[in-house]
Amino acid sequence: MVAFGGYVKIAGMIDESMDTEQLKGEPQPWEFRSKPAWQRLIVMLGGIIVNIVVGILVFWMLTFKMGNTDVKMDQMVNGIVPGSIGESIGLKAGDKVIAIDGHRVENYSELLGSKVLMGGVSLTVERDGGTTEIKVPADLLNTLSDKKGEKFIEPRFKTTSIAQVAPGSVASKMGFTKGIVLSP
């Protein structure tokens, strides 16, 4: 059996690569080979079941630790940046999508969900102090699959330009120079 990556030899479990002299003797009552088939099956399945349980536990812990990484729309103060496909339907940089078919948008992932990508919906967009309705074409998903390298929309982040890099600093050794634009 395997326990945390190690191998455990079970007494009385013999294969061709081991000592076959033991096979010539009578099975002892404590040996693996003397146990009924149903008990041997439980022992063999034990390792598999433990591996599955540990795998589920690890993924559960990662999910608990990492949590939901979706961005809330009220945190997207800079709005969105449309790709070429988003621009083609009328979206502009800085637009804030506030509703889909009249229903308030809570999370950014809703904008990339099937409701929007399948098309035929209306996006309510906050732009230049007012609101605008943008109709999403019914063939948006086809357009996205036809133009694989092109984007629909992305969150818009504020960028910062480096004003000064101290000579000999870690940043200068990493190649940072004055004027490089950083984004979070």
Image: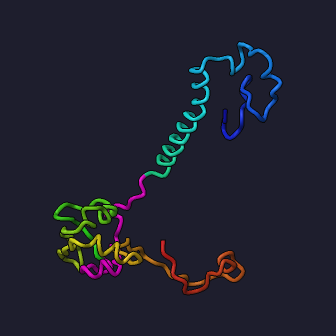
In this rendering, the answer to whether 44 lies above or below 75 is above
Q: Which residues are magenta?
A: 68-94
In this rendering, the answer to whether 107 lies above or below 124 is above
Q: Quadrant of residue 15?
A: top right
Looking at the rendering, in which quadrant would you find the N terminus?
top right
Lateral position of residue 95 relative to residue 37, left or right = left
Q: Quadrant of residue 98?
A: bottom left
Residue 79 colored in magenta in the image: yes
Estimate the x, y position of residue 143 in percent, counting from the top left.
30, 75
In this rendering, the answer to whether 115 lies above or below 66 is below
In this rendering, the answer to whether 76 lies above or below 68 is below
Residue that protrudes farthest toward the top in the picture:
29
Estimate the x, y position of residue 99 in percent, counting from the top left.
21, 65
Residue that protrudes farthest toward the bottom in the picture:
179
Lateral position of residue 175 relative to residue 128, left or right = right
Q: Quadrant of residue 12?
A: top right
Q: Residue at x 61, y 26 (%)?
A: 43
Q: Residue at x 76, y 14 (%)?
A: 26
